[in-house]
Image: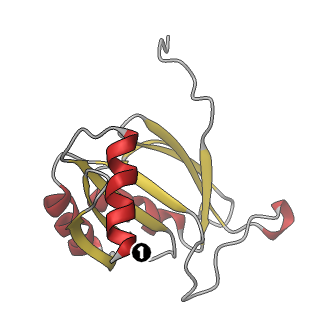
């Protein structure tokens, strides 16, 4: 019996080749595949995986269900953030798996070390390592100083 509470919100990714995406997310982000249902054509009708404690769905494109992958070369407007212990190591692992760096790892004024990557399927991922505990007031002060220069 599953004693974990069901997530309140989850999201579903649609890609052209979900089996390749599952392999990428496992290698790049340490995803754990939970379930995979094959389509009659041998693709992925539906699969579920976890990154950390986040439950994610994924499938191949299915026009009849209004599930479309992004056009090749497109980049999603949404950004998924993964909390990591070591931004630089997580970045290197994702790049080794095939991600493209959009923003290199850097310390941010809001108290994190972050990087943004694009996966081979067009989705953007931020790898975020907490490096400082800051109050909202301190973050606002730093932002004003940064944007004033």
Q: Is residue 123 visible?
A: yes
Of 19 and 110, nearer the camera is: 110
Q: Quadrant of residue 68?
A: bottom right
The residue at 31%/57% (across/down) is: 142
Q: Which residue is mark 1?
A: 118
As displayed, is residue 36 above or below residue 123? above
Q: Is residue 36 visible?
A: no
The residue at 60%/71% (across/down) is: 77
Q: Residue furthest right?
A: 64
Side of 132 relative to 40 (left or right):
left
The percent coordinates of residue 35 (x first, y second) are 51, 41
The residue at 32%/76% (across/down) is: 103
The percent coordinates of residue 20 (x first, y second) are 43, 68
The percent coordinates of residue 70 (x first, y second) are 64, 77
As displayed, is residue 141 above or below residue 132? below
As displayed, is residue 93 above or below residue 46? below
């Amino acid at each position: 019996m599953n004693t974990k509470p069901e997530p309140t919100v989850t999201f579903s990714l649609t890609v052209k080749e979900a089996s390749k995406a599952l392999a990428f997310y496992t290698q790049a982000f340490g995803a754990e595949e939970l379930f995979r249902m094959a389509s009659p054509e041998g693709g992925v009708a539906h699969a579920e995986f976890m990154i950390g404690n986040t439950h994610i769905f994924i499938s191949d494109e299915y026009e009849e269900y209004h599930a479309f992958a992004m056009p090749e070369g497109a980049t999603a407007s949404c950004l998924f953030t993964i909390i990591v212990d070591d931004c630089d190591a997580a970045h290197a692992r994702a790049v080794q798996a095939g991600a493209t760096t959009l923003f290199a790892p850097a310390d941010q004024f809001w108290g994190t070390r972050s990087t943004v990557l694009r996966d081979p399927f067009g989705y953007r991922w931020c790898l975020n390592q907490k490096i400082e505990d800051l109050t909202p007031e301190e973050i606002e002060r730093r932002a004003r100083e940064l944007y004033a220069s």
